[in-house]
Amino acid sequence: MHEMSIVSGILDIAGNEARAAGARIINSVEIEVGELAGVEIPSLEFCFEVARRGTLAETADLVIHEIPGRGHCPDCDREVAMEYFMAVCPECGQALLEILQGRELRVRSINVD
Ligand SMILES: [Zn+2]
């Protein structure tokens, strides 16, 4: 499962940060997930519940910040909301939008004790 490998990456980052800080426990992990990142949030949450067992993040909350997709049309030079990875400009219908925002997939912060 695609989401499981993402979650292991997140837990690796959080675990390394926590150990570097000399922490005993991770209270929460905040991540940013773009609407166009191709990640299913419910699946990500489920994988986190499973994968955190036996790690410093065993009781951690996963806080997900969803970043809306934004695109730019090279034809009419407008900025528009973008819900799909491949989308045609809703304003002029001419061009494929360039992604400005929404592909994010990163750890924003972790909270440890
Ligand atoms: Zn356009």
Image (spheres, grey):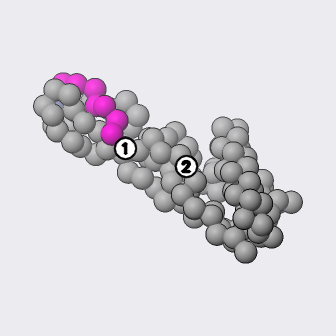
Q: Is residue 111 left or right of residue 92?
A: right
Where is residue 99? Give x, y as percent: 34, 35
Query: Which amino acid, by three-letter code, is at mark 1?
Result: Gln
Q: Is residue 3 above or below residue 46?
A: above
Looking at the picture, tell me which residue is in the foreground, 105 or 19: 19
For mark 1, give the secondary structure: strand
Looking at the image, the residue that sits furthest to the bottom is: 113
Q: Which residue is mark 1?
A: 101
Where is residue 15? Give x, y as percent: 75, 56
Estimate the spatial distance between the alpha carbons at disc 1 and disc 2, rounded to whole Å.
13 Å
Q: Quadrant of ligand 1?
A: top left
Q: Is residue 76 above or below residue 53?
A: above
As drawn, the label of residue 9 is none
Q: Residue at coordinates 21% horizontally, 37% vertically from top-left?
A: 90
Q: Is residue 87 left or right of residue 20?
A: left
For mark 2, give the secondary structure: strand
Q: Residue at coordinates 49% horizontally, 41% vertically from top-left?
A: 37
Query: Which amino acid, by three-letter code, is at mark 2?
Result: Arg
Mark 1 vs 2, N-terminal side: 1
Q: Residue at coordinates 52% horizontally, 39% vertically from top-left?
A: 38
Looking at the picture, tell me which residue is in the foreground, 110 or 95: 110
Which of the 4 image quarters holds residue 42?
A: bottom right
Residue 11 in view here: no
Q: Residue at coordinates 46% horizontally, 55% vertically from top-left?
A: 66
Q: Give the extent of the magenta segment.
A: 94-100
Q: Which residue is mark 2?
A: 106
